[in-house]
Amino acid sequence: MIEVRNLTKKFGKRTVLNNITFSVAEGEVFGYLGPNGAGKTTTMRIILGLLNPTSGKVLVMGKDLAEDDEARRSIGVALENDGLYEDLSAYDNLEYYAQLYDVSRCKERIEELLKFVGLYERRNEKVGVFSKGMRRKLAIARAIIHDPKILFLDEPSTGLDPEAQIMVRELILELSKERKTIFLNSHDLDEVQRICNRIAILHKGRIMVCDAVESLRKRFSKPMVSILMSDEENGRRVLEVLNSLDFVSGCEIKDKTITLILKEEKQPNLLKILTENGIEVEEIKKVRKSLEDIYLEIMQKEEIR
Amino acid sequence: MKKEFIIARKEMREILQSKSSLFFALGYPIFFSVMTALGIRKIPGTMDTVIFYIPLLIGILFAYVSTGRIFFREKQDKIIETLLCTPLSLKRLWLGKVLGAAIPSYAVSIFSAILIVLVSNTLMKSLVLPSPILLLHMLITIPLFLLVVVGLIGFLYLLAGMREIRAAGTVIFVVIFGALFGGLRLIGKSHISWLIEVALMIISLFLVILTGYLTRYLSKERIVTTIT
Ligand SMILES: Nc1ncnc2c1ncn2[C@@H]1O[C@H](COP(=O)(O)OP(=O)(O)O)[C@@H](O)[C@H]1O
Ligand SMILES: [Mg+2]
């Protein structure tokens, strides 16, 4: 449904997105996670055709939303601003967008959505008197008024009180059950883990991790060992040796450091096995990183900066 | 054109629901027409000049206020970003908003012309009506002129950064009024001839076309990156 290939965006000399590639499949709830300033909104704006990429390609259902006006019928958006008019009533706000999208049986659709987000009783009140949570719910109703195939949400629960956050999340979960494809920007790992089935973590314009929530959980819940070798010459052979061990489920090598993912917590004497195979080791240490740890690291780096 | 009118209708609805806009829409015409009607009574033969200037002036004043609401505020509030994600093209969005400001401004303009005629005739003993040239003025020149004013200011609001907009708005306002009062002094109290009227009409038609041409310089990226 969404294809982002080698996307780079610069504002002047500043590179905000650096060679980003990912795709979102139909029916997927995709969490685009990153601290403030990571480039989430910029990515979304480029996908929506509001900004032009400096280089790279972005397609939504095979089309470029910047060029193809009609293609924008199949998307709905709830951006940072709710896109609502304070002087108009909840009903009139929805009616305006329904007309812009040529929604048929307009009145029924509006009433159905007002009930869906629990604002039917207050449909004739001006949006100006609504709380933030109510507005956000109305914004979501507004975004799906024309029954779009893909829904884009930019930090939908940010700035809401905890109760409203829960309501908005439940609303999104409800929508995901209808097999809508959802692209969700968020800085909240917990939220994304609850709602999404696939996650990309963005940091300073680069994608750090991109995988299904389940496999990320598996990947980051296994015990890991990091080995610092004395020299990096025989890397290939080291990998061969390690991969042949039955308690190792995965192994990555980078310069002099090897990261081993183990099948279980307890492992036979690794140091002995390595030295027996003629691999000189400087240091072995246990590492255990959960998704939370990784994201926390990213967030902390961000704060120090 | 259907979508443009949906937008225009929404804008007009908002104007109608705002007390300050309504106050302007009724206040300007009433104040100015009573003031000028008193003048017409004192100086005979000035009806045409008054009808030539005052409704246009009031229309432009109202257009200026509405354009701020319709273009500036929606950009400031970032609502425009959501609208840019609808199937509407940027140009149609612009046109819809231009109509949404120009139509009520024109209504206010006509309202004030009618008021001027009514009030001055009530004050005078004999019946005085504007000459036929002024019909052309009211029916063609004024609406064209209002389209230009709204179109150009709207265009600038979309194109410029928020800080520049505040400065630009004042400059435009001063330019328009400078031009109008300059024209008024130039013509003085001489009566409005067909030549003047037709010349003005052609100028405004040219400006309408120019404004339409300028819209090709609008871009979504430009709008989105000038929001902050
Ligand atoms: N119009 C712009 N001009 C210059 N820099 C921008 C602009 N928009 C965003 N940025 C910068 O790009 C970076 C990413 O911003 P953004 O995409 O809004 O991040 P996020 O949504 O993840 O918080 C930020 O450092 C921001 O300052
Ligand atoms: Mg953002």
Image: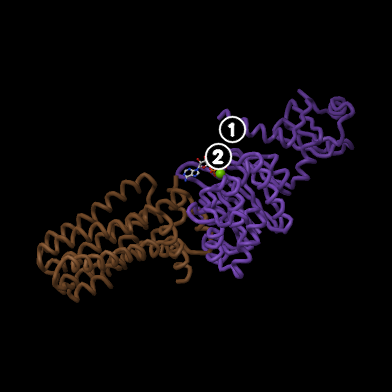
Compare residues A78 and B7 and report the one nearer the observer: B7
Task: Find disc 1 in the rendering and name its residue.
Answer: A302
* Left or right of residue B87: residue A12: left
Check the image and report above or below for A16 versus A116: above
Colour applied to chain B: brown
Residue A237 is situated, as x and y percent measured from the top left of the image, at 80, 36
| Amino acid type of the residue tagged 2 in the rendering | Gly
Residue lying furthest bottom = B132
Compare residues A255 and B71 and report the one nearer the observer: B71
Colour applied to chain A: purple
Q: Residue at x 23, y 58 (%)?
A: B32
Observer able to see residue A114: yes
Q: Report ligand 2 position as a quadrant.
A: top right
Observer able to see residue B188: no
Labels 1 and 2 share a subunit: yes
Which of the image's four quarters has the N terminus of chain B?
A: bottom left
Asked whether mark 1 and ligand 1 are closer than 8 Å, the reply comes as no
Which of the image's four quarters has the C terminus of chain B?
A: top left
* Left or right of residue A237: residue A64: left
Asked whether mark 2 and ligand 1 are closer than 8 Å, the reply comes as yes
Compare residues A108 and B145 and report the one nearer the observer: A108
At label 2, counting other C-alpha atoms closer than 10 Å, the crowd grade (few under 14, some 14-19, many 20 or more) is some
Task: Find disc 2 in the rendering and name its residue.
Answer: A37
Residue A141 is situated, as x and y percent measured from the top left of the image, at 61, 56
Q: CB of mark 1 within 8 Å of CB of mark 2?
A: yes
Chain of the residue that carries numbered disc 2 in the rendered image: A
Please report whichever mark, 1 or 2, sits nearer to the chain's N-terminal start: 2
